[in-house]
Amino acid sequence: MRISDILRVKGENVVTVPPDMPVEVLVTELARHRIGAAVVSRDGTAVEGIVSERDVVRALAERGPAVLAEPVSTIQTTQVRTVTPDAQLEDVERLMTERRFRHVPVVVDGRLAGVVSIGDVVKNRIDELETERTTLADYITGERS
Ligand code: AMP
């Protein structure tokens, strides 16, 4: 399965935040959209960074609540790993596991085209296993040849 198959179902909508947004506002955005990370972008298309709830927690632990007034740019990750829609789901799974992050932006010609989260990966894995199980069960019980 390719990443484009996931985006076809899920859509290309990505929550982006500008680098000068205060962390306090970022937190409300993450909660409002029920997501764990946002892509940092001034124009909504070029990926400048990524900021996740883990970055907020780490910064709070290290610097205390004053961090809430700081801009997102002070806690974001700027070396963002991205993939193209033709990437294989398995490769993205491996990337997430090896690099220990749960979000990967999808980029086409330098423009943001979606985001894949660990939740999407797990959902598709379960769907695949369920389809495989049904096919095997039908084969064994003779409902399909
Ligand atoms: P996450 O597991 O996605 O909440 O993120 C864990 C850490 O990895 C945080 O410091 C994020 O800023 C960073 N991160 C998340 N996604 C990516 C990515 N695609 N490329 C690089 N760093 C990332």
Image: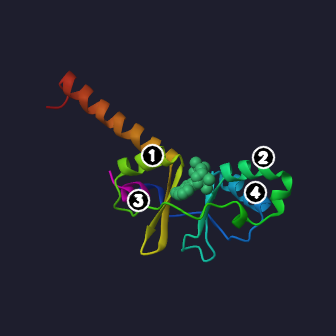
Q: Give the range drawn in magenta.
A: 1-7
Is residue 7 placed above or below 91 in the rendered structure?
below
Kindly identify which numbered label has been placed on residue 74: none
Residue that sits furthest to the left in the current view: 145
Give the residue pinned by disc 3.
8
- Residue closest to the eye, 130 or 51: 51
Q: Which residue is drawn at 47% across and 56% down?
A: 10
The answer to whether residue 77 is left or right of residue 82 is right
Q: Predominant secondary structure in magenta?
A: helix
Contact between labelled residues 3 and 4, with CB atoms less than 8 Å apart: no
Q: Name the residue under label 4.
A: 28
The residue singled out by tag 1 in the image is 121
Whether disc 4's CB lies below 8 Å from ligand 1 is answered no
Q: Which of marks 3 and 1 is nearer the N terminus?
A: 3
Element marked by disc 1: helix
- Dot 1: few (<14), some (14–19), or many (≥20) neighbours within 10 Å? many
Camera-nearest residue between 1 and 95: 95
Label located before the other in sequence (4 or 3): 3
Q: Which element carries disc 3, helix, strand or loop?
A: helix
Q: Quadrant of residue 6?
A: bottom left
